[in-house]
Image (tube, helix red, strand yellow):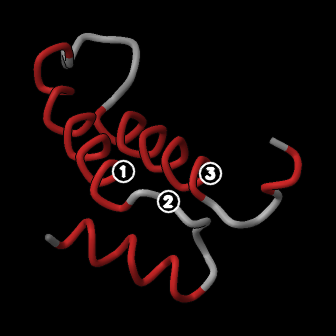
Amino acid sequence: SVVRSILDNGIRRGDFTEIDVAFTGFCLASTILRTRVWYSPEGRLSVFEIADATLELFVRGISAKNRDKC
């Protein structure tokens, strides 16, 4: 999948820590897909804010930088 390819490339480049690519890919895809269940245009966050927060959560969470602080 595209997501797994991105994760594999990030690991090879040293941008991401060693992760279970399949599991992380499933988690990210599930997060994105399930957003449609609870998202409301009248809600607290816009589509763009949700996209930014999701990206921040996953990228910061798998980032190889500052891993010693966890």
Q: Are marks 1 and 2 in contact (CB under 8 Å)?
A: yes
Q: Residue furthest bottom?
A: 13
Q: Which mark is residue 24?
A: 1
The answer to whether 1 is drawn above or below residue 54 in the figure is below
| Amino acid type assigned to the residue bearing label 2 in the image | Ile
Q: In this rendering, would 16 be left or right of 66?
A: left
Crowding at dot 1, Cα within 10 Å, few <14 / some 14-19 / many 20+, comes out as some
- Where disc 3 sits, the SS reads helix
Tell me residue 5's x, y (percent). 28, 78
Q: Which residue is mark 3?
A: 60
The residue indicated by pointer 2 is 19
Closer to the chain start, of discs 1 and 2, is: 2
Tag 1 secondary structure: helix
* Amino acid on which disc 1 is placed: Thr
Residue 33 in percent (x, y) is at: 14, 36
Residue 20: quarter of image:
bottom left
Q: Residue at x 45, y 50 (%)?
A: 55
| Viewer-proximal residue among 25 and 52 | 25
Image location (x, y in percent) of residue 67 = 78, 55
The Cα atoms of the two marked residues, 2 and 3, are separated by: 13 Å
Seen in the picture, residue 65 relative to 56 is either above or below; the reply is: below
- Dot 2 or dot 3: first in sequence order is 2
Residue at horizontal 53%, vertical 41%? 57
Q: Are marks 2 and 3 in contact (CB under 8 Å)?
A: no
Amino acid carrying label 3: it is: Arg
Tell me, for residue 62, which label it has, or none: none
Crowd tier of the residue under label 2, counting other residues whose Cα lies within 10 Å: few below 14, some 14–19, many 20 or above: few
Q: Residues within 10 Å of mark 3 (few under 14, many from 20)?
A: some
Element type at mark 2: loop
**Where, by quadrant of the figure, is residue 42 drawn?**
top left
Q: Which quadrant of the rendered structure holds the C terminus?
A: top right
